[in-house]
Image: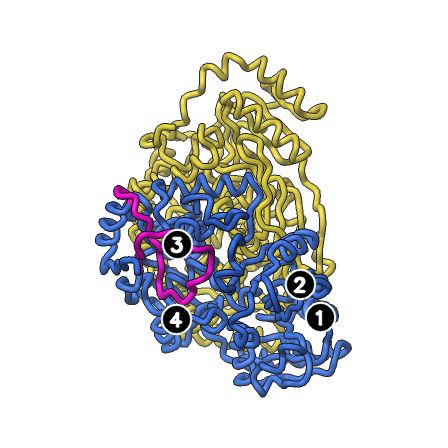
Chain colours: A blue, B yellow
């Protein structure tokens, strides 16, 4: 077992990192480690963990802004927000169920994996809520980027660069993010029994209405039976969520239901049933049971998701679930991961990216967990990485392309 | 105005080769695509930050991404600085050229390439105007959300460079939140595509890094933007208060109550008078401060939200509440607000600050702004996006009076210091450009700036792209 460092202050983290850079000691950067297995195998000599840096630093509900140390458990953040009737806009995904991991997710881990749930469609990704960060770069220097206001174009936006960098560019010690008032009410319009192509049309029609749909997902019949009982267990479920003032939700639900009734009979789920359904979609509960099966998370244009599923069905046994109006496809493979087939199909359908979320060690060999980038972008990314982490000590290999031979990474480039 | 902001010294080797450079560039561009006669260069000598003017070496007006790539590759090979330009509406000098630079103007790349309603995206060339996207998709019930005041003229490429906002970003976010992809040409001519019609990045979020980078990292030639379904209805409502303090407190309480209208715009007495004289929008003239609050949605939603806002405004002693009664009246209310800068320009020269502060500090910063300006014997008009704390004090002065011009610049710098000390930032949506470049150390430590500059190096190792902007000229790392 590698040594695990738990710095208790940013200054301590700076010292540790400076020493590691001098010694050439590679560090695997982690938070609660509930997303262990996301990314390629890291060739590290030690672990640098953020959980020693915990606690809410500043919270101004009236300004809709919170600052917290990166290792603060997500549960503590959500409890504080909930007490003030607020929430994280992007509905962070809890990856423990699909990845079979334990422990507590941290707020830093949420932003470093850009873990955005169903409301990403209407309210932006985790990166869109992140206003400012403090991080330690690969030289051991403490850096502040962004700030605590929503509009800020002062200098380069290193905040977005670090968000979603999975601990390969810097050790984030503190995050400042925007929060939103919790909607007074929610309801979900459910269309039943639609095939994937028709469901896509229905979701596009809903998003073209002035109904302010906050989330749109389609769960095909094969996996819908594992949804919460109230959502119904017979046949495919196409769901559209409305949130806001109670009076407004009622009016919008009625008008949207009328508009969509040509597609299928329409049900309306009340707030409790709606919340249960979207929690299941957010955490992908229908695809949690078979931990041995490879699971992909694919982002494509919304109208393309169902075609991706149909094309892949000709070649492989798959189960799937679509969020984000059809553009986020969770794909469970019956056998091998089929990375080449999947990525070729995504490219042929107009582009996007596929991330391997779950697979056995054997199945991963020779695969890049993250979508391989065209050469000029890969080279640019490597140059950027070298500017933040010159010694290449932060989570080497996690985001880097994996060589086909499966012997490991192309070096300490990501 | 006093010429206190320095540019990098022109590269003598570039100036001496001017004739050859012009001849070479002409071969890379279509007929009429290269401007180099002194008389024809004048329109490019400045932008909306008119205090500084310099003629560039030449102006390239490419029509395709390939031509942009050829020009950049040539300039990179010969060490020639390049200043990208959209419509030249920058308020911070972001598009002001320098004598040894080629201006790369995107105005001829103004096509809307594709509208894809099913995926709710539009793919456009960088020189397309902001407003023309909404005009194109409007008949289908859609719009493009970021709406800077200059939206009639400003281009998407420029919006991406400055991460532009607008009045309605309280609900819909700024450019970076509505941008899905770009075609970007790097300084060495390499063309890369970031993002597309899908969401989020495959690797590092280079799209997020490029947005707001002020032409420092590359030249955007095409963009894929999110379009949204238009709300059922929208209604701006005027709230008049006795003083700025009460209006500011009302804004903070509305947000704290969990109500997020699409826009909350603030005007003080000076701004109300200027805008009303210009637009005849029916603004109340007996009040000391005005809020324009816009709600949208179904009739039920607007009614419910307005009722809640009115109740809060009454607690702060609101003097007048006036709902727009027709689409014409609503348009007039916005016309007055969006004309604020132009209307101010009719009565005096002005510089416009753009600091953003936490909402709880609005009243404090307004008061300090007033004190700073009156202390220097200057008038100030405040008109800004209150819901997100993005302040726009317009400092009025006479440009023909060098002493007063210098005072205006001093006042602006002092106000921005106050914004940073209040926990805010130097610029919310206008950008750093040359205007705020030398103030960057108010906000960032040397280590913070060094890290940003190091990342900049990864894109443009010779610092040829818009090189006099954003980062203080001293303390730049050696190549």
Label whose residue precedes the other's in the sequence (1 or 3): 3
Find disc 4 in the rendering and name its residue. B316
Dot 4: chain letter: B
Cα distance in 3D space between marks 4 and 3: 47 Å
Dot 3: chain letter: A
Work out whether residue A113 can be spotted.
yes
Dot 1: chain letter: A
Helix, strand or loop at mark 2: helix
Q: Does the magenta stretch include residue A29?
A: yes
Residue A305 badge: 2
Q: Are marks 4 and 3 in contact (CB under 8 Å)?
A: no
Classify A387 as above or below B201.
above
Q: Residue at x 58, y 81 (%)?
A: A227
Label whose residue precedes the other's in the sequence (1 or 2): 1
Classify A183 as above or below B72.
below
Mark 1 or 4: in front is 1
Helix, strand or loop at mark 1: helix
Q: Which span is picked out in magenta? A: A21-49
Left or right, B245 with respect to A329, comes to left
Cα distance in 3D space between marks 1 and 4: 53 Å
Q: How crowded is mark 2: few (under 14 residues within 10 Å), some or many (20 or more)?
A: many
Left or right, A309 with respect to B260, comes to right
Cα distance in 3D space between marks 2 and 3: 29 Å
Cα distance in 3D space between marks 1 and 2: 9 Å
Q: Is residue B158 magenta?
A: no
Dot 2: chain letter: A
Left or right, B54 with respect to A25, comes to right
In this view, the residue in front, A258 or B180, is B180
């Amino acid at each position: 077992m590698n040594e695990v460092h738990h710095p208790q202050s940013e200054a301590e983290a700076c010292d540790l990192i400076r020493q590691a850079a001098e010694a050439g000691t590679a560090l695997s950067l982690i938070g609660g480690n509930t997303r262990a297995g996301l990314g390629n195998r890291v060739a590290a000599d030690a672990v640098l963990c953020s959980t020693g840096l915990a606690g809410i630093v500043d919270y101004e509900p009236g300004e809709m802004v919170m600052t917290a140390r990166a290792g603060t458990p997500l549960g503590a953040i959500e409890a504080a927000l909930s007490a003030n009737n607020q929430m994280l806009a992007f509905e962070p995904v809890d990856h423990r169920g699909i990845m079979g991991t334990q422990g507590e997710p941290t707020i830093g881990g949420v932003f470093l994996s850009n873990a955005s749930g169903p409301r990403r469609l209407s309210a932006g990704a985790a990166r869109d809520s992140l206003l400012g960060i403090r991080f330690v770069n690969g030289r051991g220097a403490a850096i502040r980027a962004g700030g605590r206001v929503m509009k800020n174009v002062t200098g380069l936006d290193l905040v977005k660069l670090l968000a979603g960098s999975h601990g390969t560019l810097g050790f984030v010690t503190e995050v400042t993010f925007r929060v939103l008032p919790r909607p007074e009410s929610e309801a979900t319009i459910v269309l039943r029994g639609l095939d994937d192509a028709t469901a896509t049309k229905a979701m596009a029609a809903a998003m073209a209405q002035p109904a302010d749909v906050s989330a749109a997902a389609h769960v095909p019949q094969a996996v819908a039976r594992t949804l919460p009982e109230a959502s119904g267990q017979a046949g495919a479920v196409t769901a559209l969520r409305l949130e806001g003032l109670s009076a407004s939700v009622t009016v919008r639900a009625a008008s949207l239901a009328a508009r969509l009734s040509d597609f299928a009979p329409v049900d309306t789920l009340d707030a409790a049933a709606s919340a249960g359904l979207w929690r299941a979609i957010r955490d992908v509960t229908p695809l949690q049971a078979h931990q041995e099966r490879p699971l992909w998370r694919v982002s494509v244009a919304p109208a393309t998701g169902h075609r991706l599923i149909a094309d892949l069905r000709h070649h492989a046994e798959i189960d799937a679930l679509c969020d984000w109006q059809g553009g986020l496809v969770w794909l469970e493979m019956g056998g091998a991961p089929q990375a080449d087939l999947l990525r070729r199909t995504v490219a042929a359908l107009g582009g996007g990216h596929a991330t391997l979320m779950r697979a056995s060690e054997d199945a991963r060999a020779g695969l890049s967990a993250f979508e391989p980038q065209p050469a000029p972008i890969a080279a640019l990314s490597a140059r950027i990485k070298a500017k933040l982490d010159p010694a290449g000590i932060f989570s080497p290999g996690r985001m880097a392309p994996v060589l086909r031979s499966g012997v490991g990474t192309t070096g300490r480039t990501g | 105005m006093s010429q206190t902001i320095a540019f990098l010294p022109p590269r003598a080797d570039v100036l001496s080769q001017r004739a050859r450079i012009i001849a070479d560039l002409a071969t890379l561009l279509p007929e009429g695509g290269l401007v180099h006669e002194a008389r024809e260069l004048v329109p490019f000598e400045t932008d909306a930050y008119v205090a500084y003017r310099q003629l560039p070496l030449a102006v390239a007006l490419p029509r395709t991404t390939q031509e942009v790539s050829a020009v950049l590759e040539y300039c990179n090979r010969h060490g020639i600085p390049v200043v990208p330009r959209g419509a030249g509406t920058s308020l911070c000098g972001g598009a002001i050229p320098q004598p040894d630079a080629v201006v790369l103007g995107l105005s001829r790349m103004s096509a809307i390439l594709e509208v894809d309603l099913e995926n709710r995206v539009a793919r456009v060339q960088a020189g397309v105007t902001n407003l023309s996207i909404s005009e194109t998709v409007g008949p289908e019930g859609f719009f493009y959300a970021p709406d800077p005041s200059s939206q009639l003229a400003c281009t998407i490429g420029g919006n991406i460079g400055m991460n532009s906002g607008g009045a309605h970003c309280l609900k819909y976010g700024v450019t970076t939140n509505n941008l899905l992809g770009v075609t970007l040409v790097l300084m060495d001519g390499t063309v890369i595509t970031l993002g597309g019609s899908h969401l989020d990045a495959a690797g590092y979020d280079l799209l997020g890094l490029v947005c707001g980078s002020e032409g420092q990292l590359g030249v955007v030639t095409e963009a894929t933007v999110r379009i949204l379904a238009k709300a059922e209805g929208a209604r701006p409502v005027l709230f008049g208060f006795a003083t700025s303090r009460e209006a500011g407190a009302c804004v903070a309480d509305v947000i704290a109550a969990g109500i997020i209208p699409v826009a909350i715009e603030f005007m003080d007495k000076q701004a109300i008078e200027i805008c009303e004289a210009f637009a005849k929008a029916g603004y109340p003239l007996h009040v000391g401060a005005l809020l324009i609050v816009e709600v949208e949605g179904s009739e039920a939603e607007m009614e419910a939200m307005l009722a809640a806002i009115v109740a809060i405004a009454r607690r702060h002693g609101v003097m007048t509440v006036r709902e727009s009664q027709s689409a014409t009246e609503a348009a007039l209310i916005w016309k007055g607000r969006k004309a604020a800068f132009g209307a101010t320009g009719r009565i005096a020269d002005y510089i416009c600050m753009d600091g953003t502060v936490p909402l709880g500090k609005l009243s404090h910063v307004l008061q300090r702004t007033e004190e700073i300006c009156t202390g220097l014997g200057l008038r100030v008009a405040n008109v800004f996006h209150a819901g997100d704390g993005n302040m726009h004090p317009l400092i009025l002065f006479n440009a023909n009076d060098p002493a007063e011009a210098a005072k205006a610049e001093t006042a602006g710098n002092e106000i921005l210091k106050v914004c940073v000390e209040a926990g805010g930032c130097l610029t919310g949506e206008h950008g750093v450009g040359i205007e705020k470049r030398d103030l960057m150390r108010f906000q960032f430590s040397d280590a913070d700036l060094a890290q940003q500059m190091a990342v900049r190096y990864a894109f443009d190792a010779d610092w040829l792209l818009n090189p006099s902007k954003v980062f203080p000229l001293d303390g730049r790392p050696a190549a």
